[in-house]
């Protein structure tokens, strides 16, 4: 498929996905979800890629779902559009490799929901965050009601959801919605730096950390711990052995 909403670049084992529809503040339409689904599907065949970075072109990361596309939808179509986005974001969240959001500007509505489906978030000082759906007489549709409270806690989530207040990058950092705030011209360098750190680690260990943490948070402690033991054990005799031997032999591991 020829991409109309996404620009892809691969460098040093990192896949950069830039959402590029700046004339509409990168609003998410049906086509965007089809393109993102294809990116996610293609990643399964690309062993070399170790980290994915998502950012936006222009003033926005993403200013939400496409209001112009949604305005004429009936109830059934609205539900379908919600499920479409939920499924794409879920598959993004379930990608084996880590996904980092580089939030360059507005992350509103579906844009914040996309950022929250990533594994962690770095933001520029210019970024602004919000779930302004109630301004439109709507509620979030891409699992924002679920992810926001899990990420920042009930009261901050409800404050953001009920008021539509657009919060600053510093406030997002304070409540744990983003992990780092940097000057706009440093954003991609900082994200690349952390992506390269992750890419240098044991690749299977990285995938297993993500899988165990993400599965663990959706289950109970005992089940999650059992999964951890299984995955811990699965690294012995291969990647883990190489990492441990490299440590003992005072050399870099050869993954
Ligand atoms: N959908 C469609 N078009 C959008 C859009 C969106 N979410 N956000 C911005 N645009 C369009 C505008 O309509 C405008 O188009 P025209 O030039 O053709 O008029 C263009 O992008 C530029 O936007 P503005 O002129 O409004 O730019 P601004 O700098 O004055 O304001 C903004 C920027 C604060 C982000 C403002 O555009 C805005 O408030 N956007 C809507 C944010 C929003 O409500 N998001 C939630 C969407 S609903 C949702 O996401 C539901 C869900 O969870 C599934």
Image: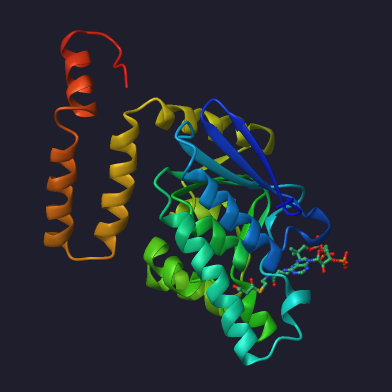
Q: Quadrant of residue 64?
A: bottom right
> Image point 31% across, 36% down: which residue?
204
Q: Percent x, y for residue 78? A: 62, 84
Q: Percent x, y for residue 153? A: 38, 67
> Image point 24% across, 58% down: which residue?
216
Q: Percent x, y for residue 177? A: 47, 56
> Image point 31% across, 16% down: which residue?
254
Q: In this rendered view, identify the residue nearer to me: 252 or 255.
A: 255
Tell whether 154 sits left or right of 190.
left
Q: Quadrant of residue 208?
A: top left
Q: In this rendered view, identify the residue nearer to me: 37 or 174.
A: 37
Report the residue that reaches farthest toward the right: 23
User: So how many labels did they put on this image?
Assistant: 0
The quarter of the picture where the C terminus appears is top left
Ligand 1, seen in the image, is in the quarter at bottom right
Tell whether 117 sits left or right of 129.
left
Residue 45 appears anywhere in the view: yes
> Image point 65% across, 86% down: which residue?
137
**Above or below for 155 versus 13:** below
**Above or below for 219 versus 234:** below
**Above or below for 219 versus 214:** below
């Amino acid at each position: 498929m020829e991409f109309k909403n996404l620009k892809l670049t691969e460098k040093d084992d990192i896949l950069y996905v830039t959402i590029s529809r700046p004339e509409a503040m990168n609003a998410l339409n049906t086509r965007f979800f089809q393109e993102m689904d294809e990116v996610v599907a293609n990643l399964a065949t690309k062993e070399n890629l170790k980290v994915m970075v998502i950012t936006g072109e222009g003033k926005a990361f993403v200013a939400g779902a496409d209001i112009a596309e949604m305005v004429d939808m009936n109830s059934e179509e609205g539900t379908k559009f919600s499920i479409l986005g939920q499924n794409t974001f879920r598959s993004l969240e379930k990608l084996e490799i880590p996904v980092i959001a580089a939030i360059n500007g507005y992350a509103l509505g579906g844009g914040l929901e996309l950022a929250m489906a990533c594994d962690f978030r770095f933001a520029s000082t210019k970024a602004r965050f919000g779930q302004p759906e109630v301004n439109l007489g709507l509620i979030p549709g891409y699992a924002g009601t679920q992810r926001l409270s899990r990420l920042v806690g009930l009261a901050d989530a409800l404050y953001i959801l009920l008021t539509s207040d657009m919060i600053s990058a510093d406030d997002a950092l304070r409540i744990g919605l983003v992990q780092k705030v940097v000057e706009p011209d440093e954003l991609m360098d900082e994200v690349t730096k952390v992506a390269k750190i992750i890419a240098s680690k044991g690749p299977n260990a990285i995938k297993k950390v993500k899988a165990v943490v993400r599965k663990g948070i959706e289950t109970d402690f005992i089940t999650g711990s059992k999964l951890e033991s299984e995955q811990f054990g699965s690294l012995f005799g291969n990647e883990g052995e190489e990492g441990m031997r490299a440590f003992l032999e005072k050399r870099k591991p050869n993954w």
